[in-house]
Amino acid sequence: MKNLQIYLVTMFMYTNFSCAQSENPPLIELGDESKIYLEKIVDGIDIPWGISFINENEILVTDKKGIMYHVSDNKKTPIKGVPEVVFNKQGGLLDIEVDKNFEINKRIFFTTSNSSSNSVKSNTALYSANYEDFEIKNIKLLYKASPDTNLSRHYGGKILLDEKYVYFTVGDRGGRDIYPQDLTKDGGKLYRLHLDGTVPEDNPFYNIKNAKKAVWSYGHRNPQGIIFGNEPGEIIIHEHGPRGGDEINVISEKDNMRDDLILSRNYGWPIVSYGINYNGTTFTDLTSLEGTESPLYFWTPSIAPSGMTMLTSDIYDSWRGDIFVGSLRYRYLERIQFVKGYVYKREKLLDKFGRVREVVQGPDGYLYVGIEDKGIFKIVPSNL
């Protein structure tokens, strides 16, 4: 009888887990990789977390271990002056972006896991600095999330720039039920600052008492992909779900449908989710809720998305306008085709080549990928 009970419990858990992990359509297809090949740009970078181009010939790359590289002519040179980071499971030297006016101001932005007390406890920090001749100087801490914690997960850390603002993400830092829904606390949020680190007075929560004034949206888990959308002021982010429920979310500059900005900026985590706990149990029964924004798309099972870019060039046949996302879990690059704002097709590229940590479009219009333990590669159409 005891063995029968164990069998029934096991089958019950397996059945629920299997049902919860059914692939969310459209089902992914295997792409035709005869149409592309990889050209190695540089190797020897263990975890190329962030990639940003100075120009067509020079690239800045972060290695999560705490090393920043200048890459040119297939050679990498370590950059001096990088502040100390707390290197742990998911923390370290994270994203990097080159200022739109770099040729004039030599400014860069980067994120790290930073400790305020020189301990193992840390949280996400955003810096600006000047880069020249393999060295960064004039380092300025623009924002430091608090409190520091010894939990080593969900830092977020992705950066997005335009000519006026720097946007950046901070994950929930493992405080699922503490930070994402509380505007007075950091964590589980997207932030917006002026490029000098000051807070724009038209941020949605600027005049709300005790709210974190830099917050642009909230209710996020661990955003690690961020790009501008097609509409003015539109931002697209993706974020890791728990087991299942990785999301793509669209954040508009203004919401004309609602008067209450608190509601129009809430993306639901952890009240609303398509995912479950890693042990197969549930933490919410809601996949949608009035007053929260639903995802544009969700991946089930989770692909562990990392890096994201939208192709704007015509170099690749019929790929213009598609979004590309790396998968850490399944080790491929995903191409997502949209039709009228909906995910129409998903295609798997570079299948099993490695954990695709970052994907960007270079100033030459080509796609570049950062593969863990392998380096940086350029994706080249075979017909060229």
Image (tube, helix red, strand yellow):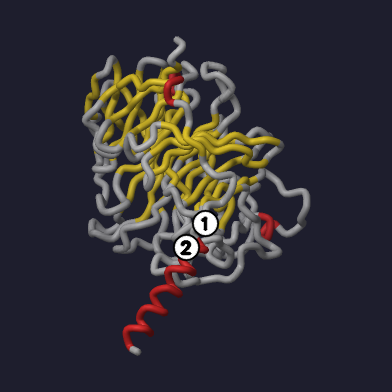
Q: Is residue 159 left or right of residue 63?
A: right
How many other residues sit within 10 Å of disc 2, few (<14), some (14-19) or many (≥20)?
A: few
Residue 222 against residue 137 in the figure, above or below: below
| Quarter of the picture holding the C terminus | top left
Whether residue 69 is visible, yes or no, is yes
Whether residue 214 is visible, yes or no, is no
Q: Amino acid at mark 1?
A: Ser
Count of picture labels? 2
Q: Position of residue 377 (x, y in %)?
A: 34, 25
Distance (Cα) linking label 1 and label 2: 6 Å
Residue at horizontal 55%, vertical 53%? 215
Residue 70 against residue 141 in the figure, above or below: above
Q: Position of residue 158 (x, y in %)?
A: 44, 43
Which label number is shown at residue 22? Answer: 1
Q: Amino acid at mark 2?
A: Ser
Name which quarter of the figure residue 360 lies in. top left
**Which SS class for mark 1?**
loop
Q: Is residue 207 left or right of residue 158?
A: right
Mark 2 sits on what residue? 18
* Residue closest to the far top: 384
Residue at horizontal 55%, vertical 70%? 284
Residue at horizontal 35%, vertical 81%? 6
Residue 180 against residue 163 in the figure, above or below: below
**Which SS class for mark 2?**
helix
